[in-house]
Image (spheres, grey):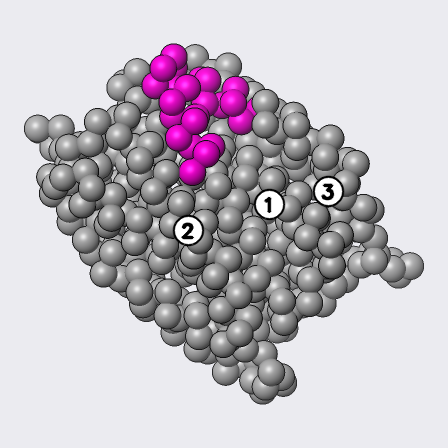
Amino acid sequence: MQKEKIIIFLLASINFTHIIDFIIIMPLGPQLMRKMQITPQEFSLIVSAYTISAAFSGFLSSFFGDKFDRKKMLLFGYFIFLSGTLICALSQNYIVLLLARIVAGAGGGILASQVNTIVADLVPYERRGNAMGMLGMAFSTASIVGVPLGLFLGNQWSWEFAFYFIVVIGLIVLPMIWSVLPNMTAHLSDKKYNPFAILQSVSKNKSQQLGLLLMSSVMMGSFTIIPFVSPYMVANVGFKETDLTYIYLTGGLMTLITSPYLGKLSDKIGKFKVLQYVVFGSIIPILIVTNLSEVPLYVALIITCIFFIFVSGRHAPSNAIVSNLAPSNIRGGYMGLISSTQNLTAGLASLITGFIVIKGDNGQLLHYNYAGFMAIFFAFVCVYVSYLLKKELSKTDNSFE
């Protein structure tokens, strides 16, 4: 049990670095748009480039993810991720930065699938919601410590220093993976490896198909909103760029408390039930955030806090659910497809919102409320798909909650 906690802490540390790398670009948006003279559409492409690249790497890893030691796959993905992040720090123009985000995203896609696969191999389903909630704390910690510090460095000097900061942390975590994580080969067999086994399984298994659809709706319901929270707060609500730190600090503090709680609650009363509660609970905060006008700083922070609590609260129960839809010998492949699906839909959601939101003559961002309506639509899709999945699973296992 103690060894399990140490490994989960290490996996959370890995998540910490690649989550900072993914979300730091969003609060840096106003600075990047100003310094590189890029449009909201070009900025949305920088955000989506990471996730779409991660989608492709996650998809490719699904064909060979179960052929190798999980530890080696994790090290491979982390090396690519850190290389891409270093190139981000060295970028001096829009095109190089865009290409660097593609490289970093390729590593991130492998990391996302392997981290969740290792948790599923290590932790029984009855306790997996709690474990996924602990991993979710990496987002909170990244928001509390990583993003504010990265933004401080970016605002004090320039945005490049935020990425140098991530590389330094990664160089500390990399040897920890090598020394602490044991070799994980229990999923390997003497049988001839079939790289297409996962596609054959998904094509025949309705539960696995619904699992992919569930994660698509979760990400579409989040990333139609998240990438433009920071630019919208600056352009429409009256935030200074330095005030953006407070959004991630306060939101991170609250989700640091709520993420593990929701994970434990999902193990206690049912993962499907908790998922549906938090999805419905997110609707009002989404409506308020995407229609917010100029208000005092503390009011905006309260609203964004509630928004992050409910949106981030979807991930522990949904990840726990899908991690149990494939047996161990093809779990890495299935989680690769899950990672690919998550990243592809997050990238597409960000890209779509980039074309919906336009800059008005007075510098304000227009039509963000339309993105909110789209997010609410996918919230209802998520609840419906979770109902179908639970119904499908109940045909073979009534204990699957």
Q: Residue furthest left?
A: 362
Residue depicted at x 91% and y 59%? 190
Q: Position of residue 2 (x, y in %)?
A: 73, 54
Is disc 1 surrounded by few (<14), some (14 to 19) or many (20+) residues within 10 Å? many
Q: Circles 3 and 2: CB distance less than 8 Å?
A: no
- Figure label count: 3
Eyeballing the image, is 398 above or below 28? below
Closer to the camera in the image, 279 or 365 = 279
User: Disc 2 residue type?
Assistant: Thr
User: Disc 1 residue type?
Assistant: Ala
* Residue 364, quarter of the rendered image: top left
Magenta stretch: helix, strand or loop mostly? helix
Q: Circles 2 and 1: CB distance less than 8 Å?
A: no
* Residue 95, quarter of the rendered image: top left
The residue singled out by tag 1 in the image is 12
Residue span colored magenta? 144-167
Q: Label 1, label 3: how many angstroms apart (C-alpha)?
A: 16 Å
User: Disc 3 residue type?
Assistant: Met
Q: Earlier in the sequence, mark 2 or mark 1?
A: 1
The residue singled out by tag 2 in the image is 255
Q: Secondary structure at mark 3?
A: helix
Q: Secondary structure at mark 1?
A: helix
Image disc number at residue 73: 3
Q: Quadrant of the N terminus?
A: bottom right
Residue depicted at x 42% and y 32%? 147
Can residue 50 be seen in this snapshot? no
Q: Position of residue 122 (x, y in %)?
A: 72, 59
